[in-house]
């Protein structure tokens, strides 16, 4: 069972990852092979 603290930490890491990726330019995202619309999926997969 995941604790409330762990759930919050997972959510916070997800949001930080999303924010960092959204700050990248389209060219930088393309270099990484990520479409802007895929950022939430990529961020969630990372957790």
Image (cartoon, rainbow, N blue to C red):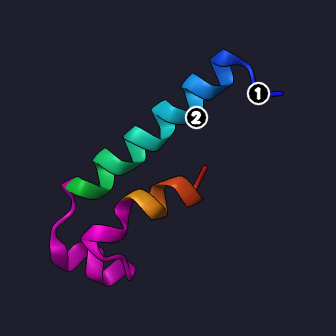
Contact, mark 1 vs mark 2 (Cβ under 8 Å): yes
Residue found at x 24% / y 74%:
28
- x and y percent of residue 38 in the render? 36, 69
Mark 1 or mark 2, which is nearer to you?
Answer: 1
Question: What separation in Å lies between label 1 and label 2 (alpha carbons)?
Answer: 10 Å
Rendered image quadrant of residue 8: top right
- x and y percent of residue 32 in the render? 37, 78
Q: Is residue 25 above or below residue 40?
A: below
Q: Is residue 33 above or below residue 22?
A: below
Residue found at x 67% / y 25%:
6
Label 2: which residue?
A: 10
Q: Start and end of the magenta stretch?
A: 23-39
Residue found at x 49% / y 37%:
13
Q: Main secondary structure of the magenta part?
A: helix
Packing grade of label 2 (10 A; few <14, some 14-19, many >=20) is: some
- x and y percent of residue 19 in the render? 29, 45
Label 1: which residue?
A: 2
| Residue 14 lies in the magenta-colored region | no
| Residue 25 lies in the magenta-colored region | yes
**Dot 1: element:** loop
Instruction: Pick whichever, 39 or 32, lies toward us.
Output: 39
Packing grade of label 1 (10 A; few <14, some 14-19, many >=20) is: few
Q: Is residue 47 above or below residue 39?
A: above
**Dot 2: element:** helix
Residue at the right extreme of this rendering: 1
Instruction: Pick whichever, 16 or 8, lies toward us.
Output: 8
Give the position of the N terminus as an image quadrant.
Answer: top right
| First of labels 1, 2 by sequence position | 1
């Amino acid at each position: 069972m995941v604790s409330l603290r762990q759930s919050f930490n997972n959510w916070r890491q997800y949001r930080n990852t999303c924010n960092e990726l959204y700050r990248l330019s389209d060219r930088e995202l393309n270099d990484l092979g990520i479409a802007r619309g895929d950022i939430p999926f990529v961020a969630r997969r990372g957790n």
